[in-house]
């Protein structure tokens, strides 16, 4: 669907769902590149195989190739966000923000320093990112970081801080591996991808240890599985748990 439908829709409408794509497809040169590469790729992926192997076999090779690549891509993608231990963020509502402001007012009246509604909303009053079991891994990592700190104090990072949420809701596998980083197109370093989406993925394996150490220093979770096979096993166990979860009847 992406190759034959979505790519063309984005190029013509200059939008990807709710995202404005004018910055890319507003340029005539970029549109020329888009249509030119579509013609070239369709030629060597469909026309050339059909010419040398016949239409039926050429199309069959194309379908098999895309199904294989699609399954491999999906396998390396799903383990980054649907896996045991990963947290899920929840969008805060207007009622949550109001409750945060009220809580801040109460603390001020009690003589405590008043936090901004945004800061309060990011931590104690509103739902922090949590696992499907209802736990918040960042509570434990905060405690561990504070215990290791020489001063016994920890720099304050809200649960719903943007960067902290990227780390809590993403999982790496084969961290630091140049081969798997190249093979997966950077998907093996999903945390770094979310934190630094504008840098080339070939750099992820070189900054991975810095990101992990920084997370440990500030008490932010950094989940990394040793390899894709362990991650896949945990992903399957997580899907099994989700499939067996009882749904409350309305």
Image (cartoon, rainbow, N blue to C red):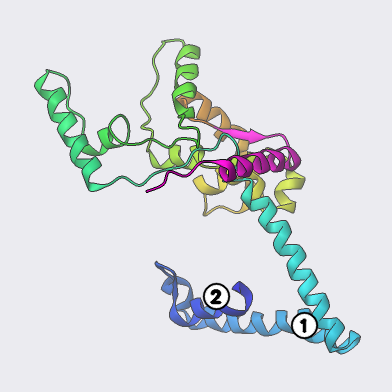
Q: Residues within 10 Å of mark 2 (few under 14, many from 20)?
A: few
| Front one among 38 and 232 | 232
Decide whether residue 231 is among the magenta residues: yes
| Quadrant of res 42 | bottom right
The numbered mark at residue 46 is 1
Q: Which residues are magenta?
A: 222-250
Q: Measuring 18% from the left and 29% from the top, which residue is drawn there? A: 103
Q: Position of residue 202 (x, y in %)?
A: 66, 50
Q: Position of residue 107 (x, y in %)?
A: 16, 23
| Front one among 15 and 68 | 68
Q: Taking 68 as reference, is 25 left or right?
A: left
Number of callouts:
2
Whether 46 is drawn above or below 137: the answer is below
Q: Residue furthest left?
A: 109
Q: Measuring 47% from the left and 44% from the top, which residue is drawn there? A: 247
Q: Which residue is mark 2?
A: 6
Q: Measuring 60% from the left and 54% from the top, which residue is drawn there? A: 200
Assign a secondary structure to mark 1.
helix
Q: Measuring 38% from the left and 35% from the top, which residue is drawn there? A: 128
Whether 155 is drawn above or below 184: the answer is above
Decide whether residue 15 is among the magenta residues: no
Q: Position of residue 221 (x, y in %)?
A: 51, 31
| Quadrant of res 185 | bottom right
Q: Residue furthest front?
A: 249
| Front one among 31 and 98 | 98
| Front one among 180 and 108 | 108
User: Which image quarter is the N terminus in?
Assistant: bottom right
Q: Position of residue 157 (x, y in %)?
A: 38, 30
Looking at the image, tell me whether mark 1 or mark 2 is earlier in sequence order: 2
Q: Is residue 174 visible?
A: no
Whether 140 is drawn above or below 129: the answer is above
């Amino acid at each position: 669907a992406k190759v034959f439908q979505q790519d063309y829709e984005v190029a013509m409408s200059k939008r990807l769902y709710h995202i404005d794509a004018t910055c890319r497809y507003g340029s005539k040169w970029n549109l020329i590149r888009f249509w030119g590469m579509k013609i070239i790729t369709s030629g060597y992926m469909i026309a050339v195989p059909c010419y040398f192997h016949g239409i039926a076999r050429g199309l069959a090779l194309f379908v098999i190739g895309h199904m294989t690549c699609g399954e491999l891509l999906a396998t390396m993608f799903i383990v980054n966000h649907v896996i045991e231990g990963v947290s899920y963020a929840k969008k805060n509502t207007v009622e949550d923000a109001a409750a945060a402001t009220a809580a801040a007012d109460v603390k001020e009246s009690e003589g405590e320093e008043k936090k901004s509604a945004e800061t309060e909303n990011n931590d104690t009053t509103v739902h922090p990112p949590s696992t499907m079991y209802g736990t918040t891994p960042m509570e434990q990592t905060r405690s561990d970081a504070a215990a290791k700190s020489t001063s016994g104090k920890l720099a304050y990072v809200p649960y719903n801080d943007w960067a902290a949420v990227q780390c809590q809701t993403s999982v790496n596998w084969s961290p630091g591996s140049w081969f798997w980083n190249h093979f997966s197109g950077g998907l093996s370093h999903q945390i770094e991808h979310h934190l630094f989406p504008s840098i080339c993925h070939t750099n992820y394996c070189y900054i991975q240890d810095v990101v992990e150490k920084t997370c440990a220093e500030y008490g932010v979770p950094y989940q990394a599985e040793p390899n894709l096979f362990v991650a896949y096993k945990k992903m399957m166990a997580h899907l099994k748990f989700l499939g067996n979860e009882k749904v409350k009847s309305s």
